[in-house]
Amino acid sequence: MNTKKLLFAFAAMLVLVAAACTPNTAEDDQLYEQGLKKGDVILKK
């Protein structure tokens, strides 16, 4: 049982490290480049 938990933790760590190391920057993000107008934001109270 401990071996399964250890292997799962190792696999989860590898996935997180692989996801963090991908070269996905804001330059590639179309939504970031498009921007947002302040008038389009509606705050609910």
Image (cartoon, rainbow, N blue to C red):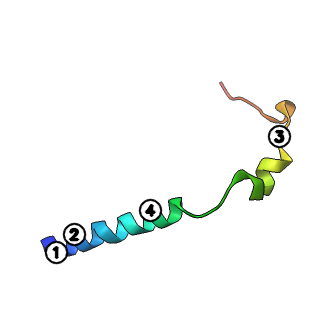
Verify CB contact (< 8 Å) between mark 4 and mark 2.
Answer: no
Which residue, given by chain and number where applicable, does mark 4 sit on? 16
Element assignment for label 4: helix
Verify CB contact (< 8 Å) between mark 1 and mark 3.
Answer: no
- Residue at left offset 53%, top offset 62%: 21
Q: Which mark is residue 3?
A: 1
Which residue, given by chain and number where applicable, does mark 2 sit on? 6
Dot 4: within a 10 Å radius of its alpha carbon, few (fewer than 14), some, or many (20 or more) residues?
A: few
Q: Which image quarter holds the C terminus?
A: top right
Tell me the kind of residue under disc 1: Thr
Quarter occupied by residue 10: bottom left
Q: Report whether 7 appears left or right of 1.
A: right
Dot 2: within a 10 Å radius of its alpha carbon, few (fewer than 14), some, or many (20 or more) residues?
A: few
Quarter occupied by residue 16: bottom left
The picture places residue 13, in percent across and down from the top left corner, at: 36, 64
Mark 4 or mark 2, which has the lower sequence index?
2
The picture places residue 44, in percent across and down from the top left corner, at: 68, 29
Tell me the kind of residue under disc 2: Leu
Element assignment for label 1: helix
Mark 4 or mark 3, which has the lower sequence index?
4
Dot 3: within a 10 Å radius of its alpha carbon, few (fewer than 14), some, or many (20 or more) residues?
A: few
Element assignment for label 2: helix
Element assignment for label 3: loop
Tell me the kind of residue under disc 3: Leu
